[in-house]
Amino acid sequence: MAQIFHPSTNTIAKVSIFGGVFILAGVAVLIMVFVHSSYATGVGVFVEQPVPFSHEHHVSGLGIDCRYCHTSVEKSAFAGIPPTETCMTCHSQIWTNAAMLEPVRASFRTDRPIEWVRVHNLPDFVYFNHSIHVAKGVGCETCHGRVDQMALTYKANTLYMEWCLDCHRHPENYIRPVEEVYTMGYQPQEDQVALGRELVKAYSIQVKQLTNCSVCHY
Amino acid sequence: MEKEALDLSAIRARLAQAKGRRYWRSLEEIAETPAFKEFLYREFPQGAAEWTDQLSRRSFLKVMGASLALAGLTSCSGQLAEKILPYVRQPEELIPGKPLFYASAMTLGGYATGVLVESHEGRPTKIEGNPDHPASLGSSDPFMQASILELYDPDRSQVVTRFGTRISTWDAFIQSLQTELDSLQANQGAGLRILTGLVTSPTLTSQLDAILAEFPQAKWHQYEPAGSDNARAGARLAFGRDVETIYNLAKADVVLSLDANFLGEGPAHIRYARDFSDKRRVWTGQTTQNRLYVVESTPSITGAKADHRLPLRASQMELFARAVAEAVGVKVGGAELAEHADWIAAVAGELQSHRGTGLVIAGNQQPPIVHALAHALNEALGNVGQTVLYTDPVAANPVDEMASLRELAEDMAADRVQLLIILDRNPVYEAPADLQFAELMFKVKTRIHLGLYEDETAELCQWHIPGLHYLEMWGDARAYDGTVSIIQPLIAPLYDGKSAYELLAAVLGQTGVSNLDLVRGYWQGQSSGGDFEARWRTALHNGIMADTTLPATSVSVQADFGSAPQAVGPQSLEIVFRPDPSVWDGCFANNGWLQELPKPMTKITWDNVALVSPATAERLGLSNEQVVELRYRERSVRAPVWITPGHADNSVTVHLGFGRSRAGSVGNGVGFNAYTLRTSEAPWFDTGLEISPTSEQYSLVTTQQHFNMEGRELVRTATLADYQARPDFAQEHSAGEGKHISLYPEYEYDGNAWGMTIDLTTCIGCNACTIACQAENNIPVVGKDQVLRGREMHWIRVDTYFEGELDNPAAHFQPVPCMHCEKAPCELVCPVVATVHDAEGLNNMVYNRCVGTRYCSNNCPYKVRRFNFLQYSNEDVPVLKLLMNPDVTVRQRGVMEKCTYCVQRINAARIEAKKENRAIRDGEIVTACQQACPTQAIIFGNINDKGSQVAQSKATPLNYGLLVELNTEPRTTYLAEVKNPNAELGGKIS
């Protein structure tokens, strides 16, 4: 019987069997790389805002506390975005003619809110509560990164569920004394894990409960 | 599926033989009709049992292959950018993300009930009762709960219209009104008529008085289609003057209801339900119970809670009342009612032996003489001042409303009306048919209508002004005991609406005065010195105005009222009109929540029916869903029949409020319009009905057979005597079962363990829990067609069970939410772990994991899981987005859902407690159903805390679980029902 396949098909067959495994594995790796890339996560990507607000300037330069603007962070699920009035407490006195601040003045004049673009956006089936996190020693920095060094605001972490669970499973690796929650660049004086374990106890954090679905999803 | 007519005599025979099984839910169930068996066989009719579609397996795989290939891509779109809009000037008391609660009041039929409204950043989302308000005590009813949907109803009228279609403005209207008024000025307003509902509002009254002073010839008419004319006339008959009758059920040990559904209707029914049930609650250790006798024509929730219930034609109620009066020695000219002699003797005996703690209540649908007899009985029995109080009328200007409307109709017919202003009423739809209001409308030169909807009346008016919802306006109203509440707005008017106050101010020439200034101005004028501002603010804050409750007045029954009993007419078929338990007089017809709410006794949704008793159906050869023609006084209407166990024989009940033509997209064409048979002479019942069967069938949707648990001992009841003799009666069914061995590991709960008990003794089946849950948890409406397929979404349903004979069965209610089983069958079968147990014993439902296999609901023995077969939540209409509770995920198509024990409330409380480093206090978490429940039948809390209410209730011998033989170890358990029948009447519940 005459040969149906040319000898070169042997090579093709070998390559495709090899490829079937490695190309698929490669695709899987690529997908994983993609979903963790800053293109997909938005980590480290500046978001354009109506006013190029600099946390670096206001926090590091002027020493304004987080809670001066994010007033409800200790009381509510939502940390709060300052009303225009808060901006105007200073900016009615200083930089009153800066072109950059015109949207703020316009907002105050016309009684229409400034439309900020959300940087940290969780899916609608996730219920995150700021107040309980700051009450139990999760620093601003732990999730939001060095906001004091951000000239423009960006996301410092993926906010993926695996990232949340990292801390919900092992809070001792992350939490700090509540006095230090608003400190930027905090460094524990002793071993973080040892301190963390003490704090977990002191703040009566029930670690087992933290991985209940209903803690975040309802 | 072909439906067979029911063989009622066979059903009777089966019931007579029945030994083991005492409880039943529907006639079809006892008859074991093929259709019912088929329904049960399929078990989950909401989903198809087998693949019946034309799509072959091969093409199915092709389709699926393509979907799988694309599945990976769907997650690539990423999240859309969202904006955050902070305030420009943030209100001081507002914390973003935290709700605020404001006190206000809702009116129904003119009477106010205090509410607390939850507001999220200025957006009202949920109504609760105001704990400080005497008519609510913190509880609510389905109407109150569903009124939030009315606010956001996209069908509400939005602009001032002229001649029905032409869009106009308020200013144009004012101009036109001014011209009309100027022409009326000459003859002192002789052609001016104002039609309102019952008015209790002091501000509105002062405005109306001012108008009548300015236009002395003008007239103010009041009409409520489901009002209390009879009660007022009865008081006049008995006392010679108008009084308001208030019952104190907290003191009543023996209650006789003469066709009065006091637990389900009326301005104080929430309060009465609380007081009534407090006297029945036995799990707390109370050893006595009150005793309720109900004589009624149409089965009601009050009848269902009765210890003894007697079905009696509405027209015989007078005879019955007279017989009771004679038996206790009130000489009113008695009448023979031989057939119920033992009943009457027993009731009379009890009332006499409970002087001062007895109570006779006459129903609003009963004629004045029955009310007068009830007053006479209460006086003779020494109940006045104890269980009955009289005050001056709450209505500002109490009139005979039917006479008032008739007078208006006569004036209209005689061309005496030039300008008719209709405020928040819909007479074209709801006036009795004999007045022919629609035709008379055209005899009025200028017709003005103000209302929430462009309804049947608006259609016939030149001017329609969009009204304001009570959550959008300032106002005031009085409760059943006279207490004034200020109605304060929670949100600026959504549309270009005006309140009745503003319209009347315009008539008085006060344009440009704001709604607030009108109401506040009135009260400022009433204020006699002192700090008005402080008082006003306190009244707003508390939801009640201090010292406005009316004091009791003393009245005495006149001798010789109605001494001659009314001659009983021929024993022909009787027609009874009732306001509907879901849509009331029709004003809630466009409310999808209420339309879809299964009615307490029939579980019918999206329709009204002609209710007949089994015996009458047998005699007339009627079957369920058969369309009949009801002919009465030369008018006729076609209605589907529903055979109702416990209905009075020879009587047909029709409910008002349906068959609307201009209610809106939800309410149009639902059911038949019973107002077309109603006359002003006999608004509530009359004999002389003719019924002619047709061969037509009409498909009704009742949820009574849905989620059937196949005759296991689900409801457990005993008499009080029984309970005291055998406190463990509720355990007898599950005796020997004990705790089964399980292959599954035990969970450990070192912290909280949430649990619920539902007390069947106090549950009155009012459905408030179902609607409260719907509002709290963003539960969608699915429509009649979907309910027919068993796809209703209610997370808590109220099952009704009947017990005993067909013609007068006892009824029992059983609310069924998710049981949160320890060994939950649903958790084990989910292939994607979307339903899991948590560390506090909750059975979590994780929407974002659910892929919709529905294995969980197939494996749930309680049938409490609900699946979004279609995209039921409306995400397209912008105004409906405002309705949503932001603390609960809005579910999409293809996702399973179920009761969560209001986990959002648990989490909120847990976070607050943890912030303060303390345990959650007992009573800190209140689930939505628990909060709404008028009788506090639902108890929720931490069962690990032995001092908690829920743990204590679970420790009583009354506590039992549903289907515990399946070893599910449900966290929701029931407290068996205890009733208190009279030994003289056999000591059995009847």
Image: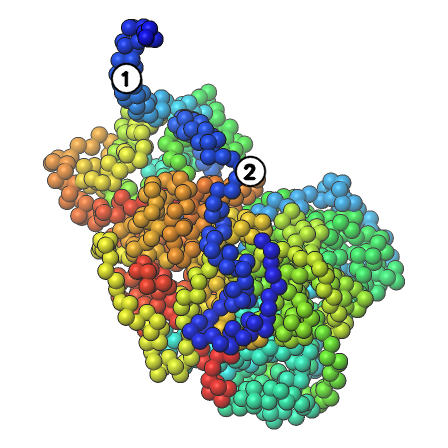
Do labels 1 and 2 touch, CB within 8 Å? no
Q: Nearer the viewer, residue B231 or B511?
A: B231
Q: Position of residue B207 (x, y in %)?
A: 70, 60
Furthest residue in direction front, as rendered: A1
- The residue that disc 1 covers is A17
Image: A107 above or below B379: above
Image: B602 above or below B243: above
- The residue that disc 2 covers is B876
Q: Position of residue B49 (x, y in %)?
A: 47, 48
Q: Nearer the viewer, mark 1 or mark 2?
A: 1
Say which mark, if any, is on residue B899: none
Quadrant showing the N terminus of chain A? top left
Image: B596 above or below A145: below
**SS state under label 1:** helix
Give the residue displayed 81% in from the left and 66% down from the top. Answer: B634
Q: Quadrant of residue B564?
A: bottom right
Q: Does mark 2 fall on the same chain as mark 1?
A: no
**SS state under label 2:** loop
- Using residue B990 as the reference point, say whether residue A20 is left or right of it: left
Mark 1 neighbour density, 10 Å: few (under 14) some (14–19) many (20 or more): few
Give the residue displayed 26% in from the left and 38% down from the top. Answer: A165
Label 2: chain letter = B
Q: Nearer the viewer, residue B926 or A212?
A: A212
Label 1: chain letter = A
Residue type highlighted by circle 2 = Asp
Q: Nearer the viewer, residue B625 or A211?
A: B625
**Residue B201 visible in rendering:** no
- Using residue A216 as the reference point, say whether residue B310 is left or right of it: right
Give the residue displayed 28% in from the left and 41% down from the top. Answer: A134
Residue type highlighted by circle 1 = Ile
Q: Quadrant of residue A128?
A: top left
